[in-house]
Amino acid sequence: MSDYITSVKNLVYTYPDGHTAVRDISFEIKRGESIGIIGANGAGKSTLLMLIMGLLMPQSGEIWVEELKVTPKSLTAVRQRIGMVLQDPDDQLFMANVYDDVAFGPRNYKLDEAEVNERVTKALQTVGILYLKDRPPFRLSGGEKRAAAIASVLSMQPGILVMDEPTSSLDPKARRRLISMLKELSQTKIITSHDMDMVMEVCDRAIVLKEGRIAADGLARDILADCRLLEECGLESPLSLQNCPLCGSKKQDPGH
Amino acid sequence: MTNITNSLYTIRFFDMAARKGTFIHRIHPVAKLLAAITYILVASSFGKYDIIPLLPLVFYPVVLLAVGDIPVMPVAKRMLLAGPFIAGMGILNPLFDHGVFYVGGVSIGAGWIACMSLIIKGALTVMSALLLIAITGMDKTAQALRMLKVPRAFVLQLLLTYRYISVLMEETARVLTAYNLRASARKGSGKGVKKNAWGSLAGQLLLRTLGRAERVHGAMLMRGFNGEYNTGELAPMNIKDIAYLAIWVLFFAAVRIYNIPALIGLLITGVL
C-alpha cells in the first residue's frame, strides 16, 4: 500500500465566468500528515478544498483519495474517507439538536442505531462537548458550534479531515481549545487558514498558494519563517515569530 | 429586525416542546400520528350545523396540553395564523345560508351556526396538528409518515421546508440589520424598509438564501446525504402505544356515533 493517502495531479479549475482559480496544482499527502494550505484571499484555497471534496469537478488533472479517483461516481465512497468542516458552522448544523447533527452522517450510511450512538458519543467526547448533546445548535456559542461541526464530521470516522478556516471568528480561549483539540486528533489533516500561528502549531507541512499555483511546499516551520516568501504571497509571518512590538527584540528562530 | 430575531428564537418552540419526557412524549410516533389523523377526520366529518355533538372533541387537545406539559399560549398564537383562512371560509355561510334555527325560542340564522361550526372544527383540527408536532417533533412525525408509506419526496419536502425556514429567517435578519444600520439618518428608520428599497432587498435576500441553502446542501452531501432524511430508527409499537391509539379511536368513534352532550343532558334531567 502506498504511503500517500491523497494525491492531486496537475489540477486545473476555471469558473464559468472564465476566472481560473486553480492552475496546474500537484502534491501528495502522507497518512497522518497535517498540512496547512495558506495563501492570500483569492489564491485558490477554497476552490482547492471544494475540488478535493468533489463539490467541483476539475477541467483537467485528477485527485486520488486512497485507492479512489474522485469522480461523480466515486463521491459517496470518497466522502466516507474525507470529512470536511466548513468555515461557517451554521452551514453545517441545522438539525434540532447537537446529537442529531452528529448522527446525521452515520445514519446516512445506514449504520444501526447502537453503532450510531457509540460513534456520536465518541465524537462528542473527543471534542469535549458531550454535555451539549441535547442542546439545539442555535443556542451554542461560536466555539461550541465549531466543536459540534467537527464532531459531526468525526462521527463518520474519516481518515482525512479537511477544514476551512477552523479558527475564524473564535475568541482567544475557544481558539486555544480548538488548537489543542486539533493537535490531539490522529487523522490526516488538510487545513486552510489565515491564522499563521495556528498553522505553525498544528501543521508539520505548509503549502503556499499564489494566484492558483503552488508558490512553496515544505516544512511549516521553514515556510512560516521565510518572511520574503510570505510577503510575496500576500501573507505575514506568525505573530509568535515577529519581533516584540514593545521592545523590538528578536524572537527565537523556530528551528531551534 | 427585533421581531424577526425574536421569531428565530420562538420558531424552535416545537423542537423544544417535543424534547420533554412526559408519558405522552414517549408514546410511539405512529400511534400519535394515527390518533391525530383519526381526530381530524372525525372532527371534519360532522354536519355543518352540528355544534353540540362536536364539543366533546375538545377533550383531546386538553388532555394533550395537560399531560404533555405544553404551554397553551404559544400554541394558541400559532393557531391564530390559520384564523383568517378559517374565518374567510366561514363568513360566507351567513351570506348564502338563510335558514333559521330556533333554540329555546330564540331564532338564530343557520348560516351563523354553520359559520360557528366551521370555526370550531377549524380550530380543533389546526390545534390537533400543532399539538401532534409539539408532542412528537417534526423529525419523528416524518419518520412515522415514512413508516406509513407516505412517499419519500413528500416527507423530505416537509422536513426541509421546516428546516430551511430558519435559514431564510436568519438571512432576512442579517439583511435587515445591514439595512437599518445604514438607514439610520432616515426618518422612521428601524420601523420598516422604505418601499423603493424593497426590490433590491428582496433580490438580495433570494440570492443570499440560495447561496446559503447551497452551502447547507453541500454540507449534507459531504456527510453522505442521498435523498433520504434519516432521523434514526423507530422501535416497534408496544402494548402501551396500541392502547393509546385504541382508547382515542374508541373515544372519537363514540363522539361521532352518539351525541354525548345530549345524552349527558338527558341523564341529568332524568329522562334516561
Image: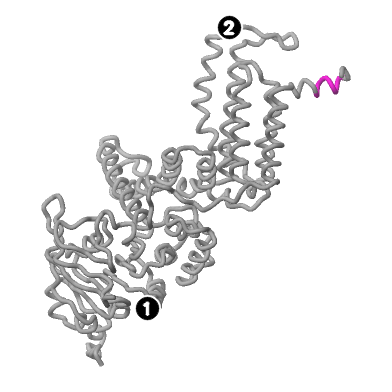
Q: Which percent across, then down, holds residue B90?
A: 54, 19
Residue shown at 38%/58% (left/top)? B223
Q: Which percent across, then down, holds residue B93?
A: 55, 14
Is residue B151 or residue A123 the one in the foreground? B151
Q: Using the rendered image, report if marks 2 and 1 lie on a common chain.
A: no
Q: Secondary structure at mark 1?
A: helix
Tag 2: Cα neighbours inside 10 Å, few (<14), some, or many (≥20)? Answer: few
Tell me where the magenta segment starts and ends, as one range: B264-269
Q: Main secondary structure of the magenta part?
A: helix
Q: Which residue is mark 2?
A: B98
Q: CA distance from mark 2 to mark 1?
A: 80 Å
**With B25 as the anchor, is A41 left or right in this view?**
left
Residue A183: which numbered mark, if any? 1
Residue farthest toward the front in the current orientation of the protein: A1
Residue shown at 67%/31% (left/top)? B58
Is residue A249 or residue A16 the one in the foreground? A16
Tag 1: Cα neighbours inside 10 Å, few (<14), some, or many (≥20)? Answer: some
Residue farthest toward the top in the current orientation of the protein: B99
Q: Amino acid at mark 2?
A: His
State which quadrant residue A22 falls in.
bottom left
Q: How is the image coloured?
A: one colour
**Quick check: is A229 in the magenta stretch?**
no
Vertically, is B211 above or below A127? above
Query: Is residue A138 shown to the viewer in this render?
Result: no
Q: Amino acid at mark 1?
A: Lys
Label 1 lies in what chain? A
Q: Which percent across, then down, holds residue A21?
A: 15, 60
**Quick check: is B268 in the magenta stretch?**
yes
Label 2 lies in what chain? B
Q: Secondary structure at mark 2?
A: loop
Q: How many marks?
A: 2
Query: Is residue A170 shown to the viewer in this render?
Result: yes
